[in-house]
Image (cartoon, rainbow, N blue to C red):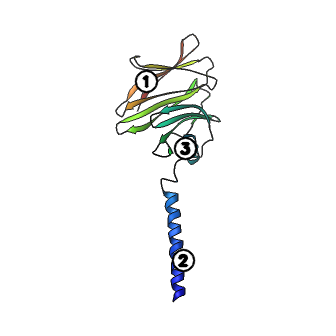
Amino acid sequence: MKLNKKHSAIMEWIIAIALVVICWKCSILSYGSFSPVKAHEQSERTYHYGPSKIIKTIDLDGGKIYLCRYKDWFSANTVRRGVIKWYPGDQVAGTLIDYSKQVSYSLSGSRIKEDAMIIDIYGYVNDPKITTILLEDKSKANSSKYALDESKMFIFYWNEDMQSGKVKYLKGLDRNGKIIYEEKFTVF
């Protein structure tokens, strides 16, 4: 009789340890990272993308955006700060550079509140004559410029309400400020 109780106790301990290990692996404590860069890398691994080279880091309230390049691909990946750790965000998937176009770009959005998103448009400039990228709205009242560096990449980001559908223009300027590229797009 004592042998059965002993086996029963051993089995209970084995089951308890297995449950603790399973709960730990599935818990929020095992997900995320203590470093925002490690959370970014974790995000890339889940998509089997990268490792990419971080071109620019943008600090946000409660997160970061990493503008990245991986071979012939570019991406703008977000990570979010939790109470203790950093967690992978959205948009880790890369966009293939289309070398037949003057500018290859992508547009993405991540929900930050119930009715608001952070929108980012980012890309790679193929045309060596383009030195600056301009983003403006239809009224031209809101515009932003991005001077290109040796990476030939750019990123714009802003908060947007969820009922947007607003028209924006992406323009490429040469060193004299002349528009040599223009593309119209609608924000979600």
Q: Which mark is residue 39?
A: 3
**Residue drawn at point x = 62 percent, y = 38 percent:** 52
N-terminal label among 3 and 1: 3
Label 2: how many residues lie within 10 Å, few (<14), some (14-19) or many (20+)?
A: few
Query: Mark 1 highlights which residue?
Result: 168
Residue 90 visible to the viewer: no
Residue 120 point in image, percent of width and height: 47, 31
Asked whether the viewer can see residue 16, the reply is: yes
Mark 3 residue element = helix
Nearer to us of marks 2 and 3 is 2
Mark 3 closeness class: few <14, some 14–19, many ≥20 residues within 10 Å: many
> Which circle's residue, 2 or 3, is located before the other in the chain?
2
CA distance separating discs 2 and 1: 67 Å
Identify the amino acid type marked 3: Ala
Callout 2 amino acid: Ile
What residue is shown with label 2? 10
Q: CA distance from mark 2 to mark 3?
A: 39 Å
Q: What is the three-letter code of the residue carrying label 1?
A: Lys
Asked which quadrant contains residue 167, the reply is: top left
